[in-house]
Amino acid sequence: MLRISQLMYSRIARRIREVVEILKGLGYYPEKISSKEFHEYMTGETPAGDTITLEDVLCNEFFMVHEVVEISELKKMNVPINRQTIIKFYPQVYEAHFTALDYELTHALNKKDYKWLKRRFENFQLQLDDPYLPPEFDYLKRKLAHRCESMIEKFSRFLSYT
């Protein structure tokens, strides 16, 4: 069992290093993220029972960009990264998600992967209307609405390229 964990941690570390180089090319310098933090964050509890698995993320460059930025943004907010992060710090995760989504979509645009842009835009409004965000954090929806509109404006013109 230990050998499998070490192999997984090595794989995660390699993927994080690859994505850090991509992000530097986008002008984003992430916080240092350990393999353990990444693994715990990706396999931790979620309010919705996330359908995207660790394996899905490790096999997809765009998801990796997203998750590395999301974790990095949380670290910048001094949020501890572990299996409970998403449950205990959901409003901060919600906010970090939009920054991560912007970098993910920018990377897809740079790679001219218009199908990925279209796929992610199909549920874009649903992300702003997140039913798992407690009502006392509705101010975040208002705060992030402008960022959401800016991203829609920035990326939507490329959706017709598919």
Image: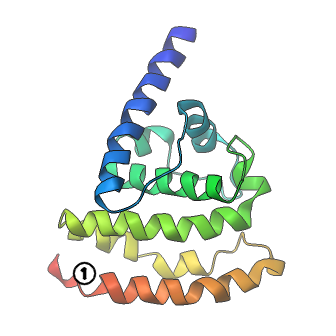
Callout 1: few (<14), some (14-19), or many (20+) C-alpha neighbours within 10 Å? some
Image check: 102 left or right of 61? right
All told, the count of numbered labels is 1
Q: Position of residue 150 (x, y in %)?
A: 43, 88
Q: Position of residue 105 (x, y in %)?
A: 35, 68
Position of 132 relative to 43 (above/below) = below
* Residue at the farthest right position: 136
Q: Dividing the image into 4 quarters, which one contains the C terminus? A: bottom left
Q: Residue beneath label 1, please?
A: 159
- Residue 109 in view in this figure: yes
Q: Position of residue 78 (x, y in %)?
A: 71, 54
Location of residue 109 by image quarter: bottom left
The amino acid type of the residue labelled 1 equals Leu
Closer to the camera, 144 or 79?
79
Closer to the camera, 103 or 137?
103
Q: Dividing the image into 4 quarters, which one contains the N terminus? A: top right
Residue at (32% x, 62% y) in the render:
26
